[in-house]
């Protein structure tokens, strides 16, 4: 097939056979073909068209964003006070003036 090539570098001898040269050239050629295939492939893009569903989702998300901005712009103390008033139960009326949950019952 090919003649053997002898290469001597720094006192070391490397023998390249015809099969070695064939395999190296095949590897380089397939690497170049793969690189060209990747480099010149078309980029695939996805285009979403407007529909009633996407318009509705956009509307709902804008409402949520507006509400969050209004909450963020309110003073913090008034927000906490209004939340506490909504969650707090009415105060209990007791006849006894003793200490609540006292183990001596005073």
Image: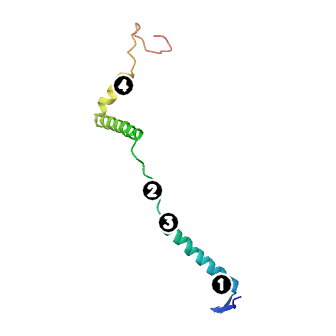
Pinpoint residue 5: horizontal percent, then vertical percent: 67, 91
| Label 1 or label 2, whichever comes before in sequence order | 1
Residue at x 70% of width, y 83% of height: 19
Whether 73 is drawn above or below 25: the answer is above
**Image point 63% across, 78% down: which residue?**
26
Q: Which residue is mark 1?
A: 21
The first of marks 4 and 1 along the sequence is: 1
**Disc ID at residue 7:** none
Give the left or right position of residue 17, taking residue 104 as reference: right
Q: Which quadrant of the view contains residue 17?
A: bottom right
> Mark 3 and mark 2 in contact (Cβ < 8 Å)?
no
Mark linked to residue 84: 4
Count residues near mark 3 (Cα–Cα under 10 Å), then give few for <14, some for 14-19, many for 20+: few
Which of pointers 1 and 3 indicates the residue nearer the eye? 3
Query: Residue 37's x, y, as percent?
Result: 53, 69
Residue where numbered disc 2 is placed = 45
Residue 51 in percent (x, y) is at: 40, 41
Q: CA distance from mark 3 to mark 4?
A: 62 Å
Q: Earlier in the sequence, mark 4 or mark 2?
A: 2
Instruction: Name the colouring of the figure.
Output: rainbow
Determine crowd level at label 2: few under 14, some 14-19, many 20+ residues with C-alpha closer than 10 A. few
Q: Earlier in the sequence, mark 3 or mark 4?
A: 3
Q: Quadrant of the N terminus?
A: bottom right
Q: Between tags 4 and 2, which lies in front?
A: 2
Q: CA distance from mark 2 to mark 3?
A: 13 Å
């Amino acid at each position: 097939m090919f003649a053997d090539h002898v290469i001597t570098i720094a006192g070391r001898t490397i023998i390249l056979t015809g099969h070695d040269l064939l395999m190296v050239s095949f590897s380089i050629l397939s690497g170049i073909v793969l690189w060209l295939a990747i480099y010149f492939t078309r980029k695939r893009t996805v285009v979403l068209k407007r529909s009633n569903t996407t318009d509705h989702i956009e509307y709902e998300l804008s409402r949520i964003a507006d509400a969050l901005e209004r909450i963020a712009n309110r003073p913090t103390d008034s927000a906490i006070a209004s939340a506490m008033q909504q969650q707090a139960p009415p105060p209990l009326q007791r006849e006894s003036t003793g200490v609540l949950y006292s183990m001596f019952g005073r």
